[in-house]
Image (cartoon, grey):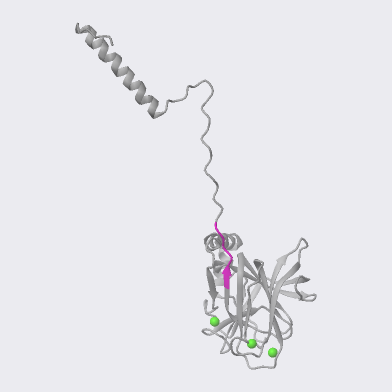
Amino acid sequence: MHQTTARTTQPVAAGRRAAKAGPKAAAAAGLTMMAALAGAPGHATVIDFDAPAIAGAVAEAPGDSFAGDGVTFRTVRLSGTVALGATITLADVNGDMRLYRDATAISGEQLAGPALGGSSNDLLMSFAAPLASLAVTSDDAVETANTIRLIALAETATAGRYRVVDFVEALDDAVASPANRLALAPSENFSIALFEIRTQQEAFDDLTFTFAGGDPVVDPPPPPPPPPVGVAEIPEPGGLALFAGMLGAATAARRMARAGVRVKAV
Ligand SMILES: [Ca+2]
Ligand SMILES: [Ca+2]
Ligand SMILES: [Ca+2]
């Protein structure tokens, strides 16, 4: 559990850089990363949220602060029943996430969660390429047990509606592995996931994901173009040698005739 009264509007340094660069630059960076990573089957990425360092105990950060690692975040609110194959609704809250700096971190001193806080706000993760697996570790806070979930989603034809591909749930008071770890590896690849906090504010650390990858499609070489109409085909090398041999014999015969040498007929 994290207290939520210390909200600050100070963006982190990386957030300022991303905002200055603009969404097109962030999108271009994401696409570059997608191109680099999508073709690397089994490539695992771990985001420990320890950089950029925040000055205080908590800071809101733009959701594209980690776009260069292949994932963007948005704070949303879930409604509907989470069940395999069911459809849920995600209402957009804002385009931010939150970084914490305290002793509940799993690695280093920082960890992440949804922006805002104090209610059941959830963190949507959109990945630059389809995933084969995804895992997070919940914070090390000593608290009463509440359910948290990690949900793999697929978009539907209706904006804001998502199909539940797979999900795992745990209790947020767990402070040791494997009880504090939420991990997914469904048979269906997915590129959207949700960290659902059903009651109080919760954070997580060490976001780990593996791109599904796959061999790149390689087009076969195109067939050679046909010769232009009216242009004779160029003889094959074998034909050229035969033609050169015949030409050489005729030339030699002419030279011998000019020199008065009789050529005996055979
Ligand atoms: Ca960390
Ligand atoms: Ca926890
Ligand atoms: Ca709790």
Residue name at image x 57 percent, y 88 percent: 102
**213 in magenta:** yes
**179 in magenta:** no
User: Which span of residues is magenta-colored?
Assistant: 209-215
Given residues 84 and 24, the one toward you in this image is: 84
Q: Position of residue 78 (x, y in %)?
A: 75, 75
Residue name at image x 54 percent, y 75 percent: 46
Q: Position of residue 71 (x, y in %)?
A: 60, 69
**Residue 176 found in image quarter:** bottom right
Q: Quadrant of the C terminus?
A: top left
> Vertical placement of 252 versus 149: above or below?
above
Given residues 26 and 80, the one toward you in this image is: 80
Tell me if I can see residue 98 in this picture: yes
Q: Quadrant of the N terminus?
A: bottom right
**Residue 67 found in image quarter:** bottom right
Q: In the picture provided, is 224 more to the left or to the right than 9? A: left
Q: Which residue reaches farthest right?
A: 80
Q: Which residue reaches farthest front?
A: 266
Given residues 240 and 112, the one toward you in this image is: 240
**Residue 197 found in image quarter:** bottom right
Q: Position of residue 152 (x, y in %)?
A: 68, 72
The total of numbered circles placed on residues is 0
Tell me if I can see residue 117 in this picture: no
Q: Position of residue 207 (x, y in %)?
A: 58, 76
Given residues 135 and 68, the one toward you in this image is: 135
Quarter of the rendered image showing ligand 2: bottom right
Q: In the picture provided, is 5 more to the left or to the right than 16? A: right
Residue name at image x 61 percent, y 67 percent: 131
